Amino acid sequence: MELNERIRQVQERLTQAARSAGRDPEEITLCAATKLQSEQTIRAAIAAGIRVCGENREQELTAHLQEDAYAGAQQVHFIGHLQTNKVNRVVGRVELIQSVDSSRLLQAIQKQAQKLGIVQDILLQVNIGAEASKGGVAPEEVGELAQQAVQLPNVRLRGLMCIPPVAQSPQEATHYFVAMRQLFVDTKEKMADNENDMDCLSMGMSHDFEQAIACGATLIRVGTALFGPRPTADTPKK
Ligand SMILES: *Cc1c(COP(=O)(O)O)cnc(C)c1O
């Protein structure tokens, strides 16, 4: 299937899922997960209507920025694990860092944003399934990290993100999305005057974004459904 056709299908699925949930499709952002995709594919996706690109690795982000591969996109997000020593190559170069999961990382982002004289938008990544292998802050620690974030002058907390465990059933996936939605609402309520900044709940990928939308996602991150099976590091990119 052509890239254009896949993009059109994902946009249609998004619209349908929003309507079924009684929501306005316009309030849901489609973020294309572009990891391992070539500069040409990213350009083609943007030409076909993709507005937001999400990168996982600092090296790929830096390379694509140098190639100006995101020209025409409205936003670039960072969605992968971010090492503290890579912060300087990400802060100020993306509109949103979705994957903040420690106090140390938060401080490093603050330091660099201050140096650049900007305010960096971030999400806190939540390990909603409490999986040992996954990044993200534990649900019970979100409140405290959120409080730290809102006290930093060069960081703006925009919401929460999660990558739930691989679900064995649609019910199981929904269970995690509902838990995330509740955590989002609870965290927002505790934010006092920063409450209005918190407008982003990033959850849902190729196989489960309809359920995520039904549970309140405002941003979905989709790779495979847009681009087809991902190129691997050892198959040449086309
Ligand atoms: C790759 C990736 C996605 C998209 O995954 P697909 O299953 O290919 O849609 C979403 N979020 C993150 C953080 C990713 O790394």
Image: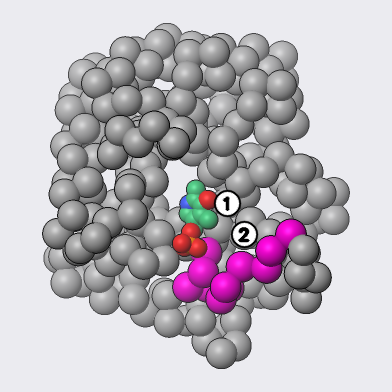
| Crowd around label 1: few <14 · some 14–19 · many ≥20 (10 Å) | many
Labels 2 & 1 near each other (Cβ < 8 A): yes
Residue at image coords 68%, 17%: 112
User: Which residue bears the numbered disc 1?
Assistant: 54
Mark 1: secondary structure: strand
Separation of marks 2 and 1 at Cα, in angstroms: 6 Å
Magenta residue span: 223-233
Upstream in sequence: badge 2 or badge 1: 2
> Mark 2 falls on what kind of element?
loop
The residue beneath circle 2 is 34
Q: Give the residue drawn at x 63%, y 56%.
A: 35
Q: Is mark 1 within 8 Å of ligand 1?
A: yes
What scheme was used to colour the molecule? one colour
Image-based side of 186 in relation to 27, left or right: left
Residue 204, x across and y down, in percent: 35, 56
Classify mark 2: residues with Cα within 10 Å, few (<14), some (14-19) or many (20+): many
